[in-house]
Image (cartoon, rainbow, N blue to C red):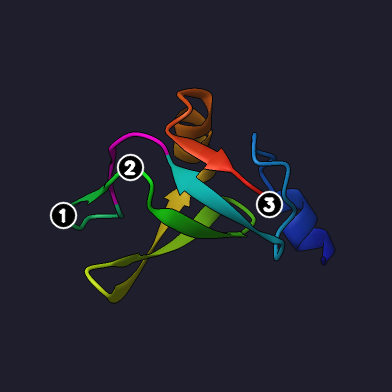
Amino acid sequence: MTLQDTLAFMPGHDGLQPGESARGRVTSVLEFRAGDGPMIQIQPDYQLSLERAPQSMVISWQEDGQPMNAAIPVVEFNQFIDAKQIVIER
């Protein structure tokens, strides 16, 4: 991690450092807007692959057999963890 990355890093409730990954699970309907795009809804019990970026969490999942992914700002991801809508299963 460079000095610039260190300065830009926003710690989150996920406990991960940039570049680290983990698995997670959605426990209740998860709804968010990825950037300026449409609302995204992920159903309970979906398995997530999580990869930490300096100020966001990149999540990947399968929906109807199709790979999906989105980046969620750390602040918003923290809210999902606090509400127990996402559980990290390292």
Residue 65, by quadrant, is bottom left
Where does label 3 land, which residue?
Answer: 8
Where does label 2 land, which residue?
Answer: 44
Viewport quadrant of the N terminus:
bottom right
Residue 24 x, y percent position in the rendering: 54, 50
Q: CA distance from mark 1 to mark 3?
A: 27 Å
Q: Nearer the viewer, mark 1 or mark 3?
A: 1
| Label of residue 38 in the image | 1
Between 64 and 35, the one nearer to me in the picture? 64
Q: Nearer the viewer, mark 2 or mark 3?
A: 2
From this viewpoint, which residue is outermost toward the top? 83
From this viewpoint, which residue is outermost toward the front? 45
Q: Please tell me which residue is depicted at 47% across the width and 57% down the height of the picture.
A: 48
| Label of residue 14 in the image | none
Give the mark nearest the N terminus, 1 or 3. Answer: 3
Between 62 and 1, the one nearer to me in the picture? 62
Q: Is residue 56 above or below residue 77?
A: below
